[in-house]
Amino acid sequence: MTPEMASPAPPAMLAPGTAIGILGGGQLGRMLAQAAAALGFRTQIFAPEADSPAFDVTPARTIAAYADEAALASFAAAVDVVTYEFENVPVEAVRFLEARVPVRPGSKALAVAQDRLAEKRLARDLGAMTAEFAAVDSPDDLARAIARIGLPAVLKTVRFGYDGKGQAKIRSHDEVDAAHASMRGQPAILESFVAFMAEVSVVAARGLDGAFAPFAVTLNEHRNHILHRSLAPAGLGDAVAARATGIARAIADALDYVGVLGVEFFVVGAGEGQTVLVNEIAPRVHNSGHWTMDGAVTSQFEQHIRAVAGWPLGSARMLTPAAEMINLIGPEADGWPAIARDGEAKLHLYGKAETRPGRKMGHVNRLLLHSPR
Amino acid sequence: MTPEMASPAPPAMLAPGTAIGILGGGQLGRMLAQAAAALGFRTQIFAPEADSPAFDVTPARTIAAYADEAALASFAAAVDVVTYEFENVPVEAVRFLEARVPVRPGSKALAVAQDRLAEKRLARDLGAMTAEFAAVDSPDDLARAIARIGLPAVLKTVRFGYDGKGQAKIRSHDEVDAAHASMRGQPAILESFVAFMAEVSVVAARGLDGAFAPFAVTLNEHRNHILHRSLAPAGLGDAVAARATGIARAIADALDYVGVLGVEFFVVGAGEGQTVLVNEIAPRVHNSGHWTMDGAVTSQFEQHIRAVAGWPLGSARMLTPAAEMINLIGPEADGWPAIARDGEAKLHLYGKAETRPGRKMGHVNRLLLHSPR
């Protein structure tokens, strides 16, 4: 057997004690660092903000801008692998790191997830449905797009949107100019407005060995464009749930993805006609997967760390028939005493010093013996 | 109603964001700090060793001797409440802190747990059975004790024993002198050798409000005097399990205990004659309670933090019919790759840089659908 024909060696597993670098110091980075510590890994957080919540759970930090190449180089030298906790990390920073240390998931997934056009084109290429869409770089583009797609529709910046930021709904032709102005000259995408029955997500992991482990499909309720509540399982029919999970797997495979990703879907139609449209791809652990911290054998955070470290994935099995997560947004976190008094409620707080409206301060999980749907 | 007759106010709950000081930087302190962070608390670790495992999971540390009053005073000023992770913290340090900041559990529990005579006398005073015992301060004491208790027996230092350290079994009169010499002049206790069927423990919490929440009684197997495996539930008859749990509650009440404690028992007899003898009281989270990290609604670490923070206790309900914990001692931790490949195994590693024989490096939990007994 020639070396070229040898079957590939199983991927090397990073040993406990090695260091995982995390770009981003928010609550996702914090919970990733906590999961890494439980497995005996050290972590180093790279974040621009000195008061990053993740800094409370590890002594190793780099406070620097993502464009600071000296800081990135030192960071790369100090860790054995790098991951990121949010999709707005500049791709350039990840490419700079990739030349020095493995980054999982890599810049390819990040670049696609940062570009709503690339995201939708990928989904379509994989045979998944999405809203109708068109690129909009000028008022003329927008007029043509509206003529084809119709109204209502949603105009979004192609890049750097989350929690409803950078979006403008266009209900009538009166609102076109204001919507276009709100894009502030950034490349945009017009999407048909989907009259969805529900929003669901697939949070799943792909290992370095290509294995795929999806958690139960989760039903998501938003308030003011911010996730309010997630319920797993989503209560979809088996075929629709399998379809959503299959799309997530195809996306992960296409991106050579390593780690946990979230794929958000709109559910449209009912009964036999029910199906899902891909809405967004998040190349990271996902808010709608927070229930797994208490409701699954392996949490999404441990699962991500396992994947990033080249470990086989853990079981994504649920521990109870259903689980619910409710976000604590802004002053909702002030309700912690009542939650603390509920001995069955699993409270998770992110250690954020300042409560601001719309800020994710924590969440509460509850394990359920029966799905409430 | 006069002020004196007013019903007491419910204890104040420490708010998330306040700081919990932990004396001791080993794996128990580490896991306490991790549980505290999940609830949004900050932690500060006080430990003499610069490479303490707990230092990896929080940025706030004090490296100083327990006799360093200046360091203790600064520590007290920096935190809102203090707890400890092991029973060999000097009582003087805890009393020094108690004058400045609440310490939970307090010096009373610590003093009793540090003194095998006080421990056994307390258990007897509460109506619990123990091995026969006698104080031994001289060769004459030892001769009298042996005459009364008989052989085989076990001679132990009254203070600072754990994991079989400071113990000498005396099988015959030939071994008496060597056993006495091994005490190195320290006050000792002779205990009758109990031919036990099994060793079990009750890990339970008592809240600041006096509430008591026991986890399922756990069956413990030791190897070389170090805990090897714990299984919950222990498979005792209901009456015996209730008896053990009731003794733990009586001990916690008698000590005005706040936090998690472990009470170790010998199981003797069989059938209707089966009963338990108190062996040791550990005023802290306990190795035999590590299964609760994955097998109970509330882990012993979260439960301890809740109690210390004045929060109501969480549910101690098991998530599955049974759970098993196996310690990874010394080089056993080198077997991590096989454990990592088992997606149902919950691996917990303590981040200890150096593997030494007998050193607790981590543990692995497994949730079981049926008790193996």
Image: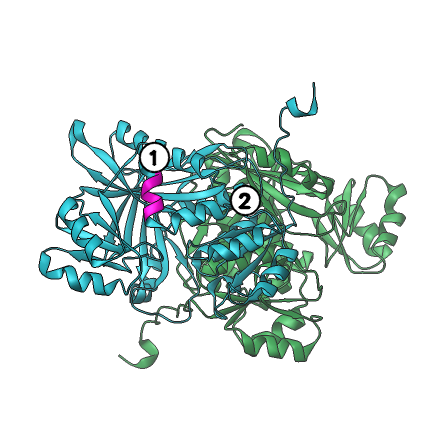
Chain colours: A green, B cyan
The disc, 1 or 2, on the residue closer to the chain's N-terminal end is: 1
User: Residue drawn 66% across and 25% down?
Assistant: B4
Residue type indicated by callout 2: Val
Task: Give the image quarter of residue A320.
Answer: top left
Task: Tell me the SS state at disc 2.
Answer: helix
Residue at the limit of the structure toward the top, as seen here: B1
Task: Tell me the SS state at disc 1.
Answer: helix
- B150 is within the stretch colored magenta: no
User: Residue drawn 18% across and 43% down?
Assistant: B196
Q: In front: B43, or A157?
A: B43
Q: Quadrant of the N terminus of chain B?
A: top right
Q: Quadrant of the C terminus of chain B?
A: top left
Measured from the top left, where is residue A22 in percent x and y?
A: 58, 65
Q: Chain of mark 1?
A: B
Badge 1, how many Cα within 10 Å: few under 14, some, many 20+?
Answer: few
Give the residues in magenta.
B117-122
Measured from the top left, where is residue B183 in percent x and y?
A: 26, 62
**What residue did someone put label 1 on?**
B125
**What residue did someone put label 2 on?**
B308
